[in-house]
Amino acid sequence: MQTVTTLLRLALLPQFGAIKIQQLLEQISLDTLLSYDRQTLSQIGWNAAQIQAWYSPQQAIIDSILNWQQQAGNHILHYFDHSYPFLLKQTRSAPPLLFVKGNIDVLSSPQIAMVGSRYCSPYGEHYAQTIAGELAHSGITINSGLALGIDGICHRAALDNHGKTVAVLGSGLNQLYPARHKKLAQQILENNGALLSELFPDTPPIAENFPRRNRIISGLSFGTIVIEASQKSGSLITARLALEQNREVFAVPGALDNPLSQGCHHLIKQGAWLIENAQDVLEILTPQISSLMPFTPAIAAQTPTPTGNRSTAQNTITISPQAKTVYTPPTINKKAAIKLDIPPQHQALMQQLNSATAISPDELSTALNRPIDQILTDLLELEILGAVQQIQGGYIKNIV
């Protein structure tokens, strides 16, 4: 409880995103942090607003969240919890806290993310349903964002094939969005799946929060499959984040005259795996499951009864129980300076921003002569770090 409370206090600090919290906890333990006085906090790089917020925590919000945790089926996983998803923990911007409804064990199962257009064609719907259903039938947990279109289709296909699925929300779990997927969300819970968010439970659905959840979707998964996406689709951000997390990216090709095929074709040109069915995915990822999961999996090749008219043999993947270990954060005695660690590749972008006038992603793309999906991904990482913030009209640089 103390760990969760302390991390909630950190999460409530101004300009203190997930990356900055992760950087902090890599250098000092929570116990050490709690022992620091105002002068020491200033010495490690905290500004006056952060120090004031640390010593005057928003206790009503904290108490409300702790009360939410006490309700049946609700869980808060912190970064040091043995139930925190191992693959997600390996990413640079792993959330310090995850709010979960449902089965937390499913978060440690082998997952594949499936994303795509909210306004998919019958072609996209068919392949999303077929591939998701076959993967779920093979023992893979389907991970997506509960959005309309491809997301919802993949969640339903997993359930229809007696599989499990995880929905990562761009809102708090008490503010489920979209409303028309409330029944689907309930079905996910009833079938041993989970709903997950890094946002406080009462956080409403705000547009700027939805791109942030993409890194969680890809971070939980061994690979990301994109089915129908335009050139500016948020699905391409998820794919780029997956690549940065050293995960596999798969794309389903489509008709050359379909704008929703352009994003997938772009990914294939950039080196994504071209896939036609679930077997293509399993051939790539089955060996990785045994090498990347923190336990020894037992993988048995079988030929289950196929769904639909497909007769392709598939692999059934079963994972032995995880040998769980509790991670202990490092403790140092010296007073380490914790400052914003801006990656070198983002310096040029930061130089284009200022703290007064918002600049749009399109303007940044033109000024830096870089693809818009790369700009959006970099802005997301900088926002999580706390270096920039999104306002009306674009992005501004935070004053630290």
Image (cartoon, rainbow, N blue to C red):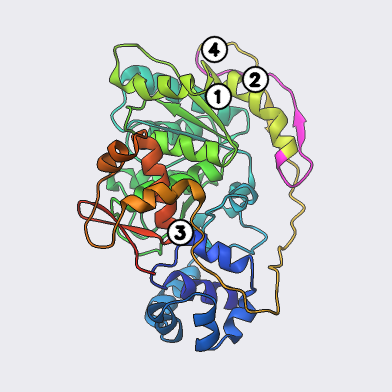
Q: Amino acid at mark 4?
A: Arg
For label 3, the SS is helix
Drawn side of residue 257 relative to residue 265, left or right: left
**Could you tell me how far apart the alpha carbons at marks 3 and 4 are, in whole angstroms?**
46 Å
> For mark 4, what is the residue?
310
Where, by quadrant of the figure, is residue 260 drawn? Answer: top left
Q: Quadrant of the N terminus?
A: bottom right
Q: Counting residues from the N terminus, which is met first, the one under dot 1 or under dot 4? A: 1
Q: Quadrant of the C terminus?
A: bottom left
User: Residue 45: horizontal and vertical position, in percent?
Assistant: 50, 74
Drawn side of residue 321 relative to residue 176, left or right: right
User: Residue 180: horizontal and vertical position, in percent?
Assistant: 28, 43
- Residue 374: in sight, yes or no? yes
> For mark 2, what is the residue?
314
Q: Are marks 1 and 2 in contact (CB under 8 Å)?
A: yes
Q: Residues within 10 Å of mark 1 (few under 14, many from 20)?
A: many
**Could you tell me how far apart the alpha carbons at marks 1 and 4 are, in whole angstroms?**
9 Å
Q: Which residues are magenta?
A: 292-308
